[in-house]
Image (spheres, rainbow, N blue to C red):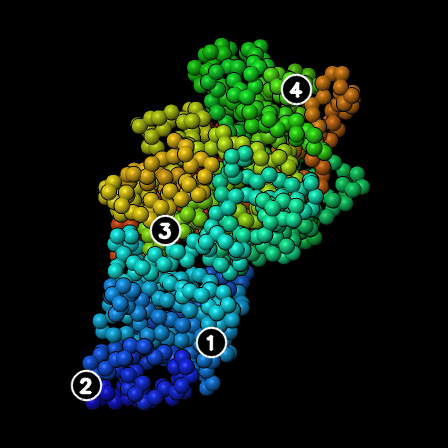
Amino acid sequence: MAAGTKSVMLALLDTFPLHVHHNNGSPLCHERRLMMLSCISGRTNNIVRARQKQIAPTVVAALIESSEKRDLNTTTITKLTAEVAVRSGNNNNNNNVFASNMKTLVNIFRPTVQPHANKGLVLQLVSSDQLGPDGKEAKLSEEIVLEWPENNVVLGGEGSINTYKVEFCVDSDFGVPGAVAVLNRYDSEFFLDSINIQQLNLHFPCKSWVQPVNKIDPHKRIFFFNKVYLPFETPIGLKQVRERDLRQMRGDSRGRRKSCDRIYEYDVYNDLGDPDKGDEYERPTLGGQNNPYPTRCRTGRPPTRIDSHAESRPSGSESIYVPRDEELADIKKHDLDRAKLIAIARNIVPALLDKMGNEGVLNIHNFIRESRHSHSNLGGTIEELFKFDPPKIFSRGKSHFLEDDEFGRQVLAGLNPLSIERLKVFPPVSKLDPCKSALKEEHIIDHIDGMSIQQALEHSKLFILDYHDIFLPFVDRINALDDRKAYATTTIFFLTKMGTLKPIAIQLALPTMDPNTSSKQVLTPPVDTTTKWLWQLGKAHVCSNDAFVHTYLHHWLRIHATMEPFIIAAHRQLSVMHPIYKLLHPHMRYTLKTNATARETLINAGGILETNFGPGKYSMQITSAAYRDWWQFDQEGLPTDLIRRGLAVPDESQPQGVRLVIEDYPYAADGLLIWSSIEKLVKTYVNHYYKDVDAISSDYELQSWYKEFINLGHPDHKNASWWPKLSTPENLISILTTIIWIVTAQHAVLNFSQYHYGGYVPMRPALMRKLIPKEGDLDYIDFVMDPERYFESSLPSLSQAAKFMAVTSIGSAHSPEEEYIGDRNDLCFWLEEPKIIDAFKQFSMEIKNIETEIEKRNADKKLRNRCGVGVTPYELLMPWSDQGVTGRGVPNSVTA
């Protein structure tokens, strides 16, 4: 060793204070200092250069004595410098609102004179390719202990990053570090953001809450480096560590889960009711033979006093359990809290007026601003605070009522574009009602441009919005509820030469005492004042059913409920190093928390949604019936769904492999662009990792994930023949494309349409309070004398309408830290796989091009369903959005 170099090293060693302590608190002896000297060997020049560049001095953490005796004369020790980034809150977004709290700090750790022997963050490197003395477990480095400086407490705050430098000393034959084991000896949790070893260009993404070891978590946390491995590719040193990490996520399905747990388990929906509060709060368990349903994340709360099979509700301020890392970021929490305060303020005056009986729901326009604001806040004028932004379907000065052309347009480009089907036979046939339909040729023949009914069917001119079989088994029970009235509705539409739909008949069905009959009436477009108001009432009842189907069946059931098990299974069966886990990770963000919140306040007994939609307490039972009768995973992909509904036909000459029956079908036309881009990305990704069928069948983590998704996630359908087989790369491409489509674009269409297309209650009521009067009914005289007043009294009250607008506004908002489709902040996992990085970049470019294409379509005057006077441009599938209630933007996951 050169004398000059050695003298520099000795000088550096002299800077290490004698009060650096081992784990047992004993002072650092001279022999240990010599060992640290050897740690510096080979790195001196780097350190000197670092000092010349004024990089912060390295932290020397307390080294714990290794149980393995070493001969310092024969063992070469290498020093590895790592940066440990700890976030003081769970918010990683640099938003201007919290800019003052979002500074990144690099703190120089200096050991305290009186160290805390039992405190600190214990870190240990895990070799990826070397085994320890037993030949089974991975080789480990010596443990080091990092203590927070007393003047820099990191366990509070709003998201600032504190970066500490630590040094690991490893043998020369240690190999490449593949993971870091972490132990938290503090009394509180902290958020570990990342660990980086710059010398080896190794990055360990953590982004997880680490719990105190003594109180809560007896296990060391393992964080792997930024490499992607199929199970059989796992380096020898990481095999057992990989499996152990997964086992820790699975739990044992016993005991009550704590908010700090990171355990993913399954359970039935037995927590929606609250029988201890009274009979009116009892709700059946969903899941099992009587009420088939997907499973949800288990919480382990104790049973209720009244019903041992029902899980008790959260008490006080307690929230429903989700694994700790599934909780919302601070900035999203603040945004939701602010939105709730604004919602409360906007409901004060309507609630008072309701109690006084001064105004009806048609006066809701008095509580809507003149113009739209980019983002609601607690500042501004009093008027701004107490008034809603105008929904896109609202236009001041225009009729309160839903006109026929807008009614038809919204079926293709509004709140719910997923229910319309091509009519294949007339009259339509019910699977439940053995009686013939009341719809006859005479009802529609004058509204189909001179065609015969057979010609209209053959030329794909007739379409149907059929809610008959969904509602009929529940209508009697719904109509027995206070202020709830419903029909089983069937609506027929005709496709005009302009490519728009017009409603031409509405059938309203009620069950009778005779199970083989039902009472039906048919409404057709008006010919006089009386039929005009009857037609308006008929459309309002259809809209009420449509709003329910949108929210409970398409939105909650087909997305939130059915996708939750896939996320649980992914965490339990796919290692964080698995390429499929990495692909899906951004698409799982916040979903479990969103669903837990729904069970807590929205879909529970007496919840916000239950009280605002027509079926009331029977809402979730209807979703169970729908899940039993018509949900199929193999039908959930966009092209397959369009073909099933008769809205598309297979056509290999088309870019997406299908041709739309209605060319100007904005949801489908724009959706197919996004579907195709997702499919292309997934195909490239899957084919990169899985070259043949053997690679699929031999991947036990992948197979376990899919089997568990079916058998534990959807146990009531586990024996269904329609589940796709996971036996080829093509199968996997289809399954993954479907999942990503559902949680991105499909969810965006249904979620971010709620306020702008469904929030204005006079046009789109979510419940009806009266049936349509017939001659001879007591209500018929009141209807004839003042049809507008009767219509208004059939709708929700002013207070109900204001609450509904407030709820849909909160649910339709983008948070400041939303992550959108096409954006990925985790490309570091594929640094050695440029083909994958190129695929993600190409996907991002395609998504940007899709936005440009949608803008062009919205300016095309030939497309009457998205362009024209008074026509709202279709923006729900525009990929990006500002924060707030914008009616556009496709997030990466189910975030609301």
Q: Amino acid at mark 3?
A: Leu
Cα separation, mark 2 vs mark 4, equals: 99 Å
- Quick check: marks 3 and 1 in contact, CB under 8 Å? no
**Element on which disc 2 rests:** loop
- Quick check: marks 4 and 1 in contact, CB under 8 Å? no
Query: 203 or 289: nearer the eye?
Result: 289
* Place of residue 586 in the rendered image (x, y in percent of width and height, measured from the top left): 41, 51
**Label 1 sits on residue:** 119
| Sequence-first tag of 2 and 1 | 2
Query: 625 or 112: nearer the eye?
Result: 625
Does 781 sit above or below residue 792? above
* Residue shown at 74% from the left, 24% from the top: 787
**Label 3 sits on residue:** 574
Q: Amino acid at mark 4?
A: Thr
The label on residue 1 is: 2
**Element on which disc 1 rests:** loop
Cα separation, mark 3 vs mark 1, equals: 33 Å
- Quick check: marks 4 and 3 in contact, CB under 8 Å? no
| Sequence-first tag of 3 and 1 | 1
**Label 4 sits on residue:** 512
| Sequence-first tag of 3 and 2 | 2
Q: Quadrant of residue 709?
A: top left
* Place of residue 847 in the rendered image (x, y in percent of width and height, measured from the top left): 38, 44
* Residue shown at 53% from the left, 68% from the top: 156
Q: Amino acid at mark 1?
A: Lys
* Residue shown at 54% from the left, 35% from the top: 291
Cα separation, mark 2 vs mark 1, equals: 38 Å
